[in-house]
Amino acid sequence: MMKLLLAGQISLIICCIFYLIWWRAGFYPGVTVSRLTGKVGILFYLTAVFGLPGVYLSIRGINSIETEHDLISGFVVVGGGAALYVILLIGSSAILHRQVTTELLLIVCWTMLEVMAVQKVFSAGMIGWIQLVVMFIIIAVAAVLSLVFYLTYYNVEPMRGFVYGMIPLITEALTMAVFVAMLRVR
């Protein structure tokens, strides 16, 4: 059902907003705070309060949209995403010597979720080829930017790294906002 998908995407946008606020409060260079307790901790938990239901509602929404034939099989998206994660995990840690963090998994899973959502609404006839291509390009740009800033985070001075840590959240929230707007306009 489209309402579930929209609710999930909106919840994930709110999650990104709280994540950005938490990032600002907990990771600003030169500031030392507990990231999981007190006021900063509340921001972290608000991120989860919107993020987890956002993922759940998005997946439920995707699965509730009926299609005769999906453009891309869910097995292909999940299998491709899992393979990509392993390649990026090995490449970033063994070859680039980048400390592995949760963000890599979040970037790959978010990309898989958005590809599934967009291809599902296309397969159901809810958006056309132009919207599909536009969304796939936006998702790809957001994913690549996220990976670039993820990979370079530890190789730059602290303030630049602080900004680099925010860019994936911004690009992903904007991507979902474009998708939500596209669905609401149709």
Image: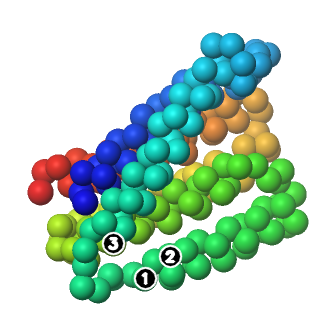
Can you say whether 3 is above or below 36 in the image? below
Please provide percent x and percent y for residue 3: 24, 51
Residue at 17% from the left image edge and 67% from the top image edge? 126
Q: Are marks 2 and 1 in contact (CB under 8 Å)?
A: yes
Q: Amino acid at mark 2?
A: Val
Task: Report the Cα–Cα distance between label 1 and label 3.
Answer: 9 Å
Q: Is residue 66 left or right of residue 72?
A: left
Q: Amino acid at mark 1?
A: Ser
Judging by the rendered image, the residue that carries numbered circle 2 is 77
Please provide percent x and percent y for residue 34: 77, 19
Residue at 30% from the left image edge and 52% from the top image edge? 4
* Residue 178, label in figure: none
Disc 2 is placed on an element classified as: helix
Judging by the rendered image, the residue that carries numbered circle 3 is 119
Q: Are marks 3 and 2 in contact (CB under 8 Å)?
A: yes
Judging by the rendered image, the residue that carries numbered circle 1 is 73
83 and 53: which is toward the camera: 53
Task: Report the Cα–Cα distance between label 2 and label 1.
Answer: 7 Å
Residue 165 sits in which quadrant?
Answer: top right
Q: Is residue 13 left or right of residue 112?
A: left
Task: Report the Cα–Cα distance between label 3 and label 2.
Answer: 10 Å
Q: Amino acid at mark 3?
A: Gln
**Can residue 11 be seen here?**
yes
